[in-house]
Amino acid sequence: MKNELVDHITTIFHETFGSAPEHIVRAPGRVNLLGEHVDYNDGFVLPAAIDRATYIVFAPADKDFSTLVAVDMDQQASFSPQTISSKTQVNGSPLPEWAQYPAGVMWSLNEEHLSTPAMNAVFASNVPRGSGLSSSASVEMTFALAWQTLSDWKLPSMQRALLGQKAENQYVGVNCGIMDQFASACGVENKLLLLDCRSLEWKTIPLPEDVSIVVADTTVRRKLTSGEYNKRRFACEEAVRLLNEDLPTIRSLRDVSVEDFNRLAGKLPEEVSKRARHVVEEIERSKQAEALLEAGNIRRFGELMNQCHISLRDLYEVSCPELDVMVHVAQSLEGCYGARLTGAGFGGCTVNLVRRAEAEPFAKALANGYESETGLGPEIYVTRASNGAELLL
Ligand code: ADP
Ligand code: MG
C-alpha cells in the first residue's frame, strides 16, 4: 500500500518513539446522499464512506499510558484509563480538545470493560475538519479499531460505531446521531449504505461504476448552528406530540404517512408544520430511493436529491445563500444527476452525483461558477464510496 500520508506519519513515529510502528489503521469520513435531518426522527439515511480518511500508525507501549501524536495539530498528548475521568493527561494538564475524541473512545470502551492497552501512536487525516464530512467520527473509529487490534476483544463494526457515538455524546459533549460513526465503521467500497436509524438494521446498495460522488465545500461556516439544530429537533418533537391526538400509536415522525400528514397538517402551527413536512416527505423519498438505486435509476434518484435540497431550503430552512448558489450552479452543469446541501446545513458542503466521465470538468466549472457568484474559493473533492475502518497492517 503506497500512501504519502502513511509514509509521513511513519517517519514521525520513528523520530518520536525510536522504533517502527507495528500496525496501520484507516477510518474514513462520510457523506450523506439522502435522508437529511431524519436520523433523530427514526428515519432512513443513505450515507457512503468516502476515500478520505484518518490514518494511524501505532505499536504497543511498554508503559501504563498511551502517547498520541496528532500531526495535523502539531501536538502530543499522554493519557491512561486512570487520567481520562478527569479529562487530564498523565502530567496533570488538561486534555487538548482534539485528544478528547480518542480519550472518549478509551472511556466508552472501558465502560464496557474492554481493555485499551497502552500504545504509542501517530495519526493524521485528509478529511477536512469541521466541514461536515465527519472528521471526528473518522478519528474515533481509527482509535476504536487501533485499541481492538492491540486487545483480545473483538466487536462487530456497528458496536464500535455505537461506542464512538457514546464517546462523542457523553465524553466530548457533542449531540450527534449514529450515522457518522456508522458510515465510518461499516462503509463498503462502491456501495451506498442504507441505515434504518430506529432498528439499526442496514444494507448496502450498489452505486454504478460510472457515477462519481463530488463534495463541494462552500467554505462558509455559520456560528450558532447548534441552537438552530436544537430548535429543529424540538419542532419535530412538538409535531409528534400534537399529531398524537389523532394518531395515538405514533412514536416519531417516522410513523406518520404522507397521507395522514396532509390530512392533519392544518392542525399544527405553521413553523412546526413546515419542519415536520420536510421530515415526513424526506423519509418517503428515502424509501423510494432504495428501489430506484437497486434498479440503477440514478437519474430519478438525482431528482430526489434535488427535491431534498428544495425541502431543506424552504421547509426545514437550514440552507444559506452560498449553499443555494453551489447547488444551483451544479444543477446547470453537464453530467450532474443531483445536487443538494448535505449535513446539518447553514454552510458546509453540498453533495453531487455526477457522471464519472464528466466529474473533473464538472468540478472545475462548479468551482469557477461558485467563485464568480460569491467571490469565495470553494474546495471540491471528487470522491467515491470506500471501505469503512480497516486494519491495513
Ligand atoms: P466534523 O464535521 O469534521 O466531524 P467536528 O467539529 O465534529 O467536525 O469535529 C472536528 C474535531 O475533531 C476537531 O476540532 C478535532 O478536535 C477533531 N479532529 C478531527 N480531525 C482531526 C485530526 N486530523 N487530528 C486531530 N483531531 C482531529
Ligand atoms: Mg463531527
Image (cartoon, rainbow, N blue to C red):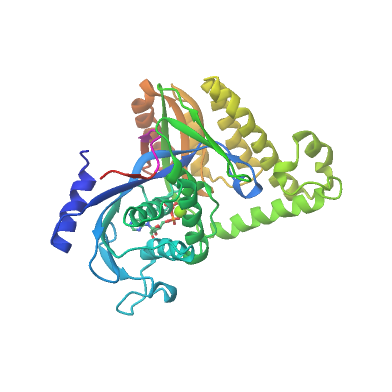
Is residue 18 left or right of 378 when viewed as pictured? Answer: left
Q: Residue furthest right?
A: 246
Residue 316, x across and y down, in percent: 64, 45
Answer whether residue 267 is visible to the viewer in this image.
yes
Res 53 → quadrant: top left
Residue 101 among those drawn in magenta: no
Front residue of 59 and 170: 59
Is residue 244 left or right of 75 when viewed as pictured? Answer: right
Is residue 192 left or right of 64 when viewed as pictured? Answer: right
Q: Residue at position x 65%, y 54% from top?
A: 233
Answer whether residue 71 is visible to the viewer in this image.
no
Q: Is residue 127 above or below residue 360?
A: below
Res 122 → quadrant: bottom left
Front residue of 368 and 348: 348
Q: Residue furthest bottom?
A: 92
Is residue 124 left or right of 308 when viewed as pictured? Answer: left
Q: Quadrant of the N terminus?
A: top left
Q: Residue at position x 72%, y 48% from top?
A: 252
Number of labels in the image equals 0
Magenta stretch: helix, strand or loop mostly: loop
Res 202 → quadrant: top right
Q: Quadrant of the C terminus?
A: top left
Q: Residue at position x 65%, y 37% from top?
A: 283
Q: Which residues are magenta?
A: 382-388
Q: Residue at position x 61%, y 32% from top?
A: 307
Residue 61, x across and y down, in percent: 24, 64
Residue 269, x across and y down, in percent: 79, 50
